[in-house]
Image (cartoon, helix red, strand yellow):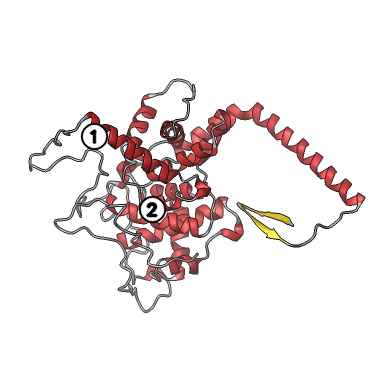
């Protein structure tokens, strides 16, 4: 019985092995030799131009880094909305089996667009879908690129097909068609290959990097800094030996410390994704590690000190994701309204009948008057997707 490998799993096959002729065998050997020679030439060329390649990547990294301060100036987009959209993008990314770098490129395109254009909250998910389409077309396999009707089904039919196409084109024009971005996955793979880290460490670092996607603090963090910090934190969590990888700069130390403060309440969607054996069950291992650390802290300090109260008497959450009240900014500097401006405007093309929102699937959550604008990952399912296409 032969086993045929199909991407990430094996499928049993009862087909007998076919015998090949000597001529076909010779051709196969010749192709293998050609591939070996090509790989060796690529390796030599990479060693020769590695310094130039890394210099170019770091320049691209600086040029395509989003500015969280500009996103702060959005009129309707609030930071408490971000986890809902990231949950949706992670689920869509998994549903279409896209490459890891596609997810990070999607969020990069989303943040870069939101730092250049005013986005209404009813279009926030549409911008995320357009970014996912662009990222998938840029670096993923053609047969895995999502279809518009599939994304529309995941959005509960909130948008017309033409709206996806128009928003996709508007994102590209806004970014001057500058899509290329060295993602955190790119730098992680380089460090893992150099330091010979295990698959378990790599998966834990990827889990930590995706946790960082939910928080404002890491929007303007360089991918190279995030990759090095997440790998160091992953080795510490899994009790792997430290790697002598040179001196650490201040941004890397700050990123490592801030990451450690955001591990205790990951998104339920993300935790389920990384609880599978394919990802070495790293979300479960992280939860066990945090429980052990909490137990050690309770033994060391049986009576924890109270949080420092504010003037209003409420405790201060210094690690919470920053958010602002509704309508905090009256104007946006150098901003332009995101077409389409209104759901039933002319910019939507041939809609005709207007913008009908199904009552079963609201667009974007709005905070209650006496409700903290903090997303509780473990209690709420993905807000945007009420059903999925798997």
Return the residue found at the far right.
Answer: 22
Instruction: Out of 317 and 170, give the one closest to the viewer.
Output: 317
Snapshot quadrant of residue 352: bottom left
Return the residue found at the far bottom.
Answer: 353
Q: Dot 1: what SS?
A: helix
Identity of the residue drawn at 43% across and 75% down: 350
Instruction: Out of 104 and 204, give the one closest to the viewer.
Output: 204
Q: N-terminal of the two: label 1 or label 2?
A: 2
Snapshot quadrant of residue 34: top right
Q: In this rendering, does residue 243 appear at all?
A: yes
Disc 1 versus disc 2: nearer the observer: 1
Identify the residue under disc 1. Answer: 298
Asked whether the residues under the numbered discs 1 and 2 touch, taking CB atoms below 8 Å apart as contact, a structural biologist would say no
Q: Dot 2: what SS?
A: helix
Label 1 to label 2: alpha-carbon separation: 33 Å
Residue 354: give x, y in percent of width and height.
34, 76
Identity of the residue drawn at 38% across and 53% down: 86
Q: In this rendering, does residue 183 appear at all?
A: no
Rendered image: mark on residue 222: none
- 376 displayed left or right of 91: left
Snapshot quadrant of residue 87: bottom left
Q: Quadrant of the N terminus?
A: bottom right
On screen, residue 304 above or below 163: above
Instruction: Out of 59 and 269, give the one closest to the viewer.
Output: 269
Crowding at mark 2 (Cα within 10 Å: few <14, some 14-19, many 20+) = many
Identity of the residue drawn at 40% across and 75% down: 351
Identify the residue under disc 2. Answer: 86
Residue 246: give x, y in percent of width and height.
47, 21
Residue 153: give x, y in percent of width and height.
44, 69
């Amino acid at each position: 019985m032969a086993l045929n490998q199909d991407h990430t799993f094996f499928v049993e096959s009862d087909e007998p092995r076919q015998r090949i002729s000597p001529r076909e065998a010779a051709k196969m050997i010749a192709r293998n030799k050609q591939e070996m020679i090509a790989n060796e030439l690529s390796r030599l060329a990479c060693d020769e131009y590695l310094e130039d390649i890394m210099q170019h990547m770091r320049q691209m990294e600086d040029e395509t880094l989003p500015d969280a301060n500009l996103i702060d100036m959005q009129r309707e987009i609030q930071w408490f909305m971000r986890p809902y959209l990231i949950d949706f993008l992670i689920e869509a990314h998994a549903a279409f089996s896209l490459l890891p770098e596609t997810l990070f490129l999607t969020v990069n395109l989303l943040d870069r667009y939101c730092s250049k254009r005013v986005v209404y909250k009813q279009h926030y998910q549409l911008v995320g879908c357009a970014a996912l389409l662009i990222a998938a077309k840029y670096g993923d396999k053609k047969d895995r690129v999502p279809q518009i009707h599939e994304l529309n089904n995941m959005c509960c039919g909130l948008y017309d097909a033409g709206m996806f196409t128009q928003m996709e084109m508007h994102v590209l024009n806004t970014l001057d068609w500058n899509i290329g971005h060295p993602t955190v996955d790119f730098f992680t793979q380089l460090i893992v290959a150099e330091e010979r880290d295990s698959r378990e460490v790599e998966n834990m670092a990827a889990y930590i990097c995706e946790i960082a996607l939910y928080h404002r603090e890491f929007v303007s963090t360089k991918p190279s800094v995030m990759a090095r910090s997440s790998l160091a934190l992953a080795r510490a969590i899994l009790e792997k030996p430290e790697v002598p990888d040179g001196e650490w700069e201040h941004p890397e130390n700050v990123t490592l410390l801030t990451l450690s403060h955001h591990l205790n309440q990951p998104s339920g969607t993300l935790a389920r994704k990384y609880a599978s054996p394919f990802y070495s069950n790293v979300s479960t291992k992280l939860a066990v590690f945090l429980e052990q650390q909490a137990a050690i802290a309770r033994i060391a300090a049986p009576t924890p000190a109270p949080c420092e109260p504010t003037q209003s008497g409420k405790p201060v959450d210094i690690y919470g994701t920053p958010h602002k009240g509704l309508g905090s900014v009256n104007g946006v500097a150098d901003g332009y309204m995101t077409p389409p401006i209104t759901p039933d405007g002319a910019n939507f093309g041939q809609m005709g009948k207007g913008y009908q929102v199904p009552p079963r699937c609201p667009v974007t959550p709005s905070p209650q008057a006496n409700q903290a604008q903090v997303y509780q990952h473990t209690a709420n399912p993905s807000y945007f997707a009420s059903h999925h296409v798997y």
